[in-house]
Image: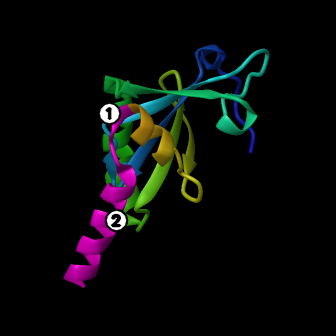
Amino acid sequence: MAQRFLPAIAEGDKRLLLIGGVPAPYVLARKAAGNEVRANLAVGGVPTARALSARDAAIAAALGPILAARGLDLVGLDLIGDHLTEINVTSAGMFKEMLEQTGVHLGATLLDLLEERARTR
């Protein structure tokens, strides 16, 4: 994968989780540590929960229904500034950090979705 360098990465990136096409109420902003440019937690990035911005909500509203219609129940959208940079369908993650910082239990939300689907099939 290659992507254009976005100077807004100096402020970190954000992970926006969609469950069943619906955005979580917060994003997790990830700020790079030290001289590192990447904000990934695996390289020392520090996550901070933030309310969705209007742009975050607009991106989620545009993509959520499309991704859900394709059967993607759990998706992580990565954003730098106002730009969507990545759609994660295999490692959306960040449930633990969201729970610790906001009390929002996204694992329970995902299980509720899956249980409801199982009941209606």
**Amino acid type for the residue under numbered disc 1:** Ala
Please rate how many residues cluster around mark 1, counting C-alpha atoms within 10 Å: few if below 14, some from 14 to 19, many from 20. some
Identify the main secondary structure in magenta.
helix
Q: Which residues are magenta?
A: 102-121
Left or right placement of residue 79 versus residue 18 in this view: right
Q: Residue at x 58, y 15 (%)?
A: 11
Q: Residue at x 42, y 32 (%)?
A: 101
Q: Position of residue 21 (x, y in %)?
A: 33, 53
- Is any atom of residue 73 visible in this view? yes
Q: Residue furthest bottom?
A: 121
**Amino acid type for the residue under numbered disc 2:** Leu
Left or right placement of residue 41 versus residue 96 in this view: right
Q: Position of residue 40 (x, y in %)?
A: 67, 35
Where residue 45 is drawn, which disc sits there?
none
Q: Position of residue 16 (x, y in %)?
A: 44, 39
Q: Residue at x 46, y 47 (%)?
A: 95
Q: Nearer the viewer, residue 50 or 2?
A: 50
- Is any atom of residue 20 visible in this view? no
Asked whether 105 falls inside the magenta stretch, the response is: yes
Asked whether 54 falls inside the magenta stretch, the response is: no
**Secondary structure beneath disc 2?**
helix
Which comes sooner in the sequence, label 2 or label 1?
1
Q: Residue at x 75, y 33 (%)?
A: 43
Q: Which residue is mark 1?
A: 57
Q: Which residue is mark 2?
A: 111
Left or right placement of residue 4 versus residue 31 in this view: right
- Which quadrant of the structure image shows residue 9? top right
